[in-house]
Image: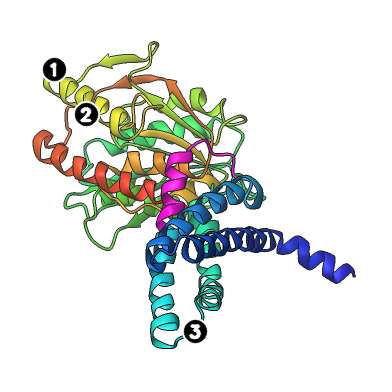
Amino acid sequence: MMQLTNFIQKKSKLIKFLIVWVSSTIIDIVSLYILVDFLNVAIFTWVIISFLLAVINGFLLNKNWTFRNKSIKYKRQFAKFLIVSFIWLLITLFLMYIFVELLWIYYIISKVLTSLFVVIWNFLWNKYWTFNIGNLNSLDNNDYKFEYSIIIPAYNEEFRIIDTLMKINDFFSKKEQSYEIIVVDDWSKDNTIKKVNDLNLNIKIFKNDKNRWKWYSVKNGILSSNWKYILFTDADNSTPIEEFDNLFRYLDEYDIVIWSRYLDNSKLIIKQPLYRIIIWRLWNKIINFFLINWIKDTQCWFKLFKSDVAKKIFRLQKINWFGFDMEILLAWKSMWYKIKEVQVLWINSSNSRIRPIKDTLKTFMELIFIKVNYWFDWYK
């Protein structure tokens, strides 16, 4: 008896789904019988109507009872449920044609046999796609021996990174907790690596297998770290490392904390050139309209994560260009993590390698790619 109880508890969703499936199948079959035998209409015309009645019943019961999904995105979920069910309909029509027209099996029996084929299809796709809300438990509660890991991507940074590394090292050396600094070199052609080694500061250096741009470097560094909190920042120290404390104080309540240039109290010591301000503000408006409307500054380069959160998100990362920031923020939303945007001090660097027109067009294509991935819940 105990084993039966345990089995029912472990398989409760599947059992509930089967009950819903039975109810939907009954609705499907009864409506089909009434429409065909009493109204004398062609079978395949009314298969579609009976199918739609079963879909509505299945969606409402599975959402509110089987999977207990609390999402308010009813239209989006119903669209996904309908897609899964439409494929189910195509399979049903194909099998019904074989059973009824070719094998001469009575259509009610044919309908029952067909339903048995597709029930597992429906359960798996609806569990892991339609009604999947991600992992609400953001942390694995790992027992970390060390505290901070600071990730810095570098490509031809010999003239900027040394001063940044010295400031970061001085800042964290004054704290009681342990820390590590990771420089991820993206196949620099200058003396970046030599100068970092000459510092003798016990800095870890990772090297990409080829030039992959800074966004891949961040991912490489994060997945190679094993510390409780992970910060990634730029080699130019445009956000001074002292701002770390302004972010860290929010980590008791939030999983991710990022800085923003566009909050009311943000301090911009050296502003960008006017043309870049216009481009970035316009681009930010586009991002807010099409993709992310809860973050004012998506392209920030001073982000602090809990390690478990960072690794879960960056394993899902597919883009290594400017869309990188938008993608990890959407991945966060898909997995229901808590994020905080805070104002900090920021000093613009004049050595930016951004190509305004070309990079903007490429990033727009990435925005579309991210939107499609998010819509289909592929960030889970």
Q: Residues within 10 Å of mark 3 (few under 14, many from 20)?
A: some
- Asked whether, in this view, residue 258 is left or right of residue 193, the answer is right
Identify the residue under disc 2. 283
Identify which residue is drawn at 48% across, 39% down.
74
Q: How crowded is mark 2: few (under 14 residues within 10 Å), some or many (20 or more)?
A: some
Amino acid type at mark 1: Leu
Relative image position of residue 205 (x, y in whole percent): 37, 53
Q: Which mark is residue 274?
A: 1
Identify which residue is drawn at 61% across, 34% down.
176
Total number of numbered labels?
3
Looking at the image, is mark 3 or mark 2 earlier in the sequence? 3
Q: Provide the residue span drawn in magenta.
A: 69-83
Amino acid type at mark 2: Trp
Quadrant location, the N terminus: bottom right
Q: Is mark 2 on a helix, strand or loop?
A: helix
Residue 109 lies in what quarter of the image? bottom right
Question: In 3D space, how far apart are the residues under numbered discs 3 and 2 (Cα atoms)?
Answer: 61 Å
Looking at the image, is mark 1 or mark 2 earlier in the sequence? 1
Relative image position of residue 253 (x, y in whole percent): 61, 29
Name the residue at the top extreme.
265
Amino acid type at mark 3: Ile
Q: Residues within 10 Å of mark 1 (few under 14, many from 20)?
A: few
Identify the residue under disc 3. 105
Relative image position of residue 184 (x, y in whole percent): 34, 51
Question: In 3D space, how far apart are the residues under numbered discs 3 and 1 (Cα atoms)?
Answer: 75 Å
